[in-house]
Amino acid sequence: MELIILNAIETKDLTKYYGGLCAVDHLNLSINNEIFALLGPNGSGKTTTVLMLTTLLHPTKGSATVCGYDVTKNGEEVRKKISYVPQDMAVDIKLTGRENVRFFADLYDVPHTSDCVDEVLAVMELTDRADDLIRTYSGGMRRRLELAQALVHEPAVLFLDEPTIGLDVAARKKIWEHIRALRKKGMTIFVTTHYMDEADQFCDRVGIISKGKIAALGSPIDLKARLMKDVITVRVEGACIPPPVPGVLFVGQTEDEVSFTAENGREALPALADALTRSGTKVRAMSLHEPTLDDVFLQAVGKQEEPHGFEDGKFRIMLRRRK
Amino acid sequence: MRGIITYFKRDFTKWTRGKVAVFSALVMPAAWLLFVGLALPVKFTGNYLDFITPGILVMTMLMAGLSGGALLMFDKILGFLNKFLALPTPRSSILVGKILFITGRGLIQATIILIIALLIGASLLGPAQYGLTYLILFLFGVLISAFSTTIALYLEDHDSYSAFSTMISMPLFFTSTALMPYDVMPAWLATIAHFNPLSYAIDSVRAVATGVFPTVALLVLTMLAVIVLGICMHVFRKVTV
């Protein structure tokens, strides 16, 4: 007997063009029972991917299934299985917390509405303030309220677009704790973020996306293991052509920082300093640290440039379609 | 159906909590009723208040419809719409709920205006006449709210929309039969008034008051409402995938 494992999210060559601009380029992903983070700079195609998976945008090419349902052909079935919390916080400030959640419970047509609403409010630690107007809620509370709205129908897959953006450190931690707790209950959680440290700390698997393509995919530990044990970051002045040093590999370069990786950083440090000076690079500072997702990102994506010759017209088309 | 009611309830609760907005919308039509309805010396009718009341009722619906046009656009700009679209609730219920809310709100405001008119001396009509009046106002409300929602969705920004609604509200009102009948208008104005949808609504409310069933006007209003609603649905679908 053949056992078919149905992944929560499956994409095949998922592609989206906005006019001539390719926002998502042949994306192939299989995600199941995990916290998966799509990691990338602004404009890399994260939100577009989420919009396609949540049936808010039609793919130009390729296909995607959520819980076995095709996002274009069986949109309504998909929407029954998922919840989506967009990046921009949208809760009605003239309604109370309870009313906001109740509103979603009614829209999802969940049975035993009142109990259900009480329960999700309790899970998100909002019971004390449930009958206050949202006007009086802090940013972190509003985000938790949005999570409560999303959880009211017990979705199989939860999409969170930049769930911690604009929140303070404590509120972020709390949101992630809640996300982790949901994951333990068996929910699949698809997060987009550009905070590397959060993805590193809290996600089971990350996909680094750049210009609509997956540049690296795996668990944070595996991804970091692709680099050697130590990472050396050099702050330089002026141009730098990385010189070849035995046992040291060039990782990538940002504005004024050049990164290398080495098996033994302490020993490589002086050798690298010599080589750089000999090749005519003015070294300002050097630092040694363990690999982080930032380094992985740098290696996978390369220099994170602000797009030059920014095509305003195309960007406008993209924004308009995204709304 | 449940979705429509839920969306309606959300807008309604939000509206009733903004206390200033509830009353401020009534000031303009009430001022017309009092300061023009009671004060304007006209020769074509003995009871100008009875003549102008249908016009002011329709004006109330017009104002309510135009100010409601921005609601769906705001839901879109503020990110609510994306959340709603990701729900299994039929997407059309978002639009239908909105149009019913805008129309319903207009009817509530029109009722208050009607009561004020009665208090300051307008003639009381029979229940069937009021029933028909409300039907006409409802149809006109659907027409205007679908129209304004379409424009707002199309313009996609609040400044342009409010400029647009300010621009059309008064000309629409003045070129209708709200203030005077066709036969006392200059010929050019009468021609315009014949094409103004407001005139259809106002004329049929007046016909009802005199005991005539306004078959043609009702048919025209229904047809217009259905057509504009269809266009609105189409634009809504286009902006949402």
Image (tube, coloured by chain):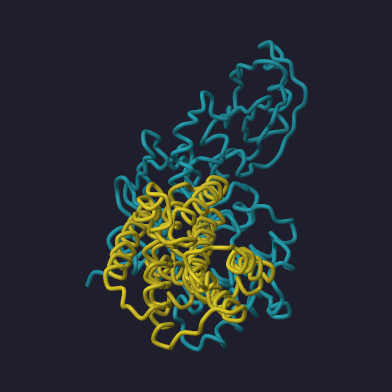
Task: Report the chain shown in cyan.
Answer: A
Query: Considering depth in this image, is A196 or A285 the residue closer to the camera?
Result: A196
Q: Is residue A48 left or right of residue A65?
A: right
Q: Residue A137 is drawn in which quadrant?
A: bottom right
In this orientation, does residue B213 appear?
yes
Q: Is residue B224 left or right of residue A43?
A: left
Outermost residue toward the left?
A1
In this orientation, does residue A184 appear?
no
Q: Report x, y in % for residue B50.
A: 50, 74
Outermost residue toward the front?
B43
Q: Report x, y in % for residue A192.
A: 53, 52
Q: Residue A74 is drawn in which quadrant?
A: bottom left
Q: Residue B119 is drawn in which quadrant?
A: bottom right
B38 versus A193 height, above or below: below
Query: Considering depth in this image, is B212 or A126 the residue closer to the camera?
Result: B212
Q: What is the quadrant of the N terminus of chain A in the image?
A: bottom left
Q: Report x, y in % for residue B35.
A: 64, 65
Q: How many marks?
A: 0
Colour assignment, chain B: yellow
Q: Report x, y in % for residue A105.
A: 51, 78
Query: Considering depth in this image, is A36 or B53 the residue closer to the camera?
Result: B53
Query: Considering depth in this image, is B92 or A8 the residue closer to the camera?
Result: B92
B239 versus B104 height, above or below: above
Residue at the image point whose x is 63% and y is 48% from the top: A195
Residue at the image point whose x is 38% and y is 59% from the top: B197
Residue at the image point whose x is 57% and y is 32% from the top: A304
Q: Is residue A128 left or right of residue B86?
A: right
